[in-house]
Amino acid sequence: MISILIGNDTYAIEREVEKFKTQTHPLWRDFNIHRFDASSLDVAISAAASVPFGVGSKLIVVENCDFKQFGETGLELLQILPHLPTTTHLVFTAAVIDKRLKVVKHLLQFGKLKEFTLIPPWRTDLIESAIATTAKQMNLSIARDAVSYLAVAIGNNSARMVSELEKLAIYAAGDRITKESALALVPATTANSFQLAEALLRGQASVAIKVLDELLSRAEFPLAIIATLQTQFKTWLWVKAALFSGKKSDSEIASLCRLSNPKRLYFLKQEVQAVSANCLSQALSILFDLEIALKTGDKPDSMLSALLRITQLTK
């Protein structure tokens, strides 16, 4: 079998490789699992072409591929793919893949492609879904508000998601995981764009300055930060407008505001209660202007003055 694991979620890729390892015979595992850098493709293919020691199968992992470096020589080496022993599982890992390359086309003829992409940090709905799904796979019972908090505290860090759920499972000892236990055990130790959005909404200039400084010091992509802020302020504006229009049904408002999780509406209502629709609209206008400015050459330093204008609106 041949697998091609692609994506920027290196933790998820490593977990997939660990699954493959369990398919080898435990008594012969140390002899039949080999990892090679892409620069050693010739040695990796030679190992893949040999039969395993003892019984069971053999796992060969070729890491850090960009496939371009294989060239014509690599393409020649890979002609052996259809003739590899059935006891060999050959795995290629890479951040990206260019399907136009000859060597990639050849690989895809015989291998199964699987992608592992990190969820964008501003898609909290997808992050919440991933946390809920992982908790279910771990046979954990977890409250919805706990999932919402974890999505903000953890972000799109899949490795931390698993480790924090494991910690919460030990603490809960079979009981339902609550938001209170999540708050106690899973600190939001690093700033994220949603904390920045909340600071802007509440007119907290000093908090906004601190969070933005931390985000930029971690080399967060400025346009990604702005995209998150725009999404959050759009949601707040939709909720405020729906409430202003006199709509009573939560399900109707959730549908109108495109909320994948209708239960989130309760918290959104509380968040926008003291802010006018006009303020939210003006804040969005500032964010769109800031996006254009960044795309046309302004430096990230220009973000601060624009965001402070929003805190003046919402204070």
Image (cartoon, rainbow, N blue to C red):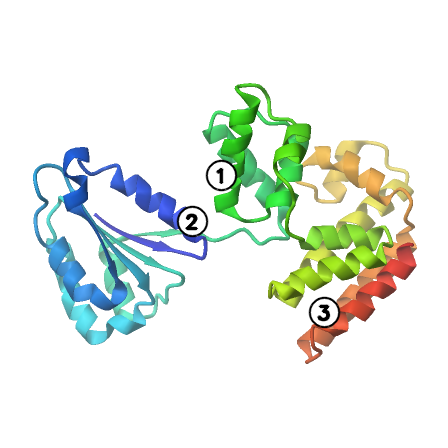
* Image spot of residue 131 (x, y percent): 55, 37
In this rendering, position of residue 281 left or right of residue 9: right
Q: Secondary structure at mark 1?
A: helix
Question: Mark 1 to mark 3: distance in Å?
Answer: 34 Å
Of callouts 1 and 3, the N-terminal one: 1
Disc 3 crowd rating (10 Å Cα; few below 14, some 14-19, many 20+) is: many
* Image spot of residue 127 (x, y percent): 58, 44
Between label 3 and label 2, give the one nearer the viewer: 2
In this rendering, position of residue 119 left or right of residue 236: left
Query: Which residue occupies the extreme bottom position in the image?
Result: 297
Query: In the rendered image, is residue 223 in sight?
Result: no
- The residue wearing badge 1 is 162
Give the residue displayed 60% in from the left and 53% down from the top: 121
- Say whether marks 3 and 2 touch (CB < 8 Å): no
Where is residue 129, by image quadrant? top right
Give the residue displayed 42% in from the left and 53% down from the top: 10
Disc 1 crowd rating (10 Å Cα; few below 14, some 14-19, many 20+) is: some
Q: Amino acid at mark 3?
A: Glu
- The residue wearing badge 3 is 291
Where is residue 203, by image quadrant? bottom right
Between label 1 and label 3, give the one nearer the viewer: 1
Q: Nearer the viewer, residue 86 or 196?
A: 196
Q: Amino acid at mark 1?
A: Val
Q: Quadrant of the C terminus?
A: bottom right
Q: Amino acid at mark 2?
A: Tyr
- Say whether marks 1 and 2 touch (CB < 8 Å): yes
Of callouts 3 and 2, the N-terminal one: 2
- The residue wearing badge 2 is 11
In this rendering, position of residue 250 left or right of residue 134: right
